[in-house]
Image (cartoon, grey):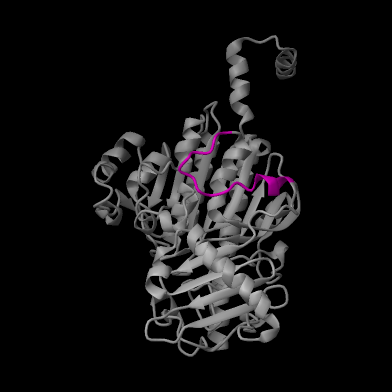
Amino acid sequence: MKRTFYILLIALGLLGGSCINHKTSLQKPNIVFVFADDQREGTINHLGNNEVITPNLDRLAEEGMSFSNTYIMGSFSGAVCQPSRAMLLTGKKLNNLTKSGAILPEQDTLLGETLQSAGYNCFGIGKYHNDPASYVRGFNEGQDVYFGGMFDQWNVPLHSREGAKNFKKFARPVLKNYRKSNKLSHEQGEYVYGGKHSADIFTEGTIEYIKNYDSEKPFFVYTSFMTPHDPRSTHQRYFDMYDTVNISLPDNFLPEHPFNNGELRIRDEKTAGFPRRASEIKEHIRDYYALITHNDEKLGQIVQALKEKGVYDNTIIIYSGDNGLAIGQHGLMGKQNLYEHSTNVPLIISGGNIKKNVRTKAMVYLTDLYPTICEIVGINIPHSVEGISFQSVLENKEKEHRPYIFTSYRSSQRAIRNQEYKLIKYHVKGEPKREQLFDMQNDPYETNNLYGNQEYAKVYNELNTAFYKALIEFEDNIWDKENN
């Protein structure tokens, strides 16, 4: 009865100013961003893969909007996840990152900094593959942070944070000299968890934060998993959900890549034998799916915590991945290439005024999320942000966002695609220059190279022209300098 009377007084405008301010602060939605490591698009049951078990991601997609054409811009090193995460948090283009994303300098206003300025508390937990100083700037709260790319999932070295003061002390040398030193990112933190899986640790910390949250400010929670990145270990029950007999090989499975792309013997490619064997690849896919199912269960627990706290209806939930992975496609295992399986990532946005059970083909970059989040919560986009908000797509799924997607890998690979076709160029040292042209509507697995086919000469010429325009737009001096 008291609660009903209180709400009535608010509706009639009879309460004092302090209560009105509290109501105003709650008008901005909370944001929970769950970030997977190495999860490619096409690994969610509801969105077309009936072999992977993802009931919670399925529900999230049903409750929101999913994007089938979300891309990373690429990488200039084999550690593809580092620049991807940097672009997400800074909104910068690949070519404008500092040290390929290893350092996020103070002149780049981070997403967390922008949200803090707008009255948010920002909590970060899990993998952070960039410099510690930027973590301190981006998150005023956090725990269980892993600074690095990969580690044993059961014995992850984690940095604790007993308040921002202690963590700033840890990061101060980097803050003073971020251009020259990132040594602290390689040091272990105050303690190491043994015998507990990373996804469980990060989820428990997230739930604890939500459960105990008592501020009137909205919150931004950034939960960054280390999975399904290898080493692919998890609880046995997740492996038991899959039988390799029921797992299909991808349509573009090959025993080996048809030519030297410059990256055929790097670390990721050595995770399976040469040539690729169908039985071994199926085992890798099973393990990959098992870790995705583990992530999915953890996502469900986070969503349940939001509901139990009573804040679910005022929370925007975003799920995405930092890059994809081949696992047998095109004879490859890793993400150091520009095929769809490596550059196309899942993206689901749910909550608030986001339309339900909608899927869009609009082409967006992961880096476009930063300005989009700003527009969703009604705050200004910093001048340093180069991504483009796709708020209009959230309002109308048929709205075009970007006419083409341009991606890069090292100095040797570049690609451009529109909704219909895709062109990849290879300039590998000691190898002849190669090109691939794919019909993405009729050949989504990129198996039939149309380059040199005169029937597609007009298509090629149009994409080739767009390609060289993109080199200018994306300030790509590396390809231009080394390959022309």
Relative to 207, 268 lies left or right: left
Rendering coords of residue 233 (x, y %): 47, 68
User: Which residue sits at x=63%, y=80%?
Assistant: 250
The quadrant holding residue 99 is bottom left
Q: Quadrant of the C terminus?
A: bottom left
Rendering coords of residue 91 (x, y %): 49, 48
Along the line of sight, the residue nearer the viewer: 348 or 371: 371
Q: Above or below — where is 64 with respect to 420?
A: above
Relative to 367, 137 lies left or right: left
Along the line of sight, the residue nearer the viewer: 196 or 137: 137
Rendering coords of residue 440 (x, y %): 68, 73
Q: Was residue 387 drawn as part of the magenta stretch in this picture?
A: yes
The quadrant holding residue 354 is top right
Q: Was residue 106 drawn as part of the magenta stretch in this picture?
A: no
Along the line of sight, the residue nearer the viewer: 189 or 467: 467
User: Which residue sits at x=61%, y=36%?
Assistant: 377
Q: Quadrant of the N terminus?
A: top right
Q: Above or below — where is 35 with respect to 162?
A: below
Q: Above or below — where is 202 with respect to 229?
A: above
- Count of picture labels: 0
Along the line of sight, the residue nearer the viewer: 48 or 415: 415
- Res. 82 in view: yes
User: Taken as a whole, is the magenta stretch helix, strand or loop?
Assistant: loop
Q: Above or below — where is 217 with respect to 334?
A: above
- Res. 39 in view: no
Relative to 379, 172 lies left or right: left
Q: Which residues make up the magenta segment?
A: 379-395
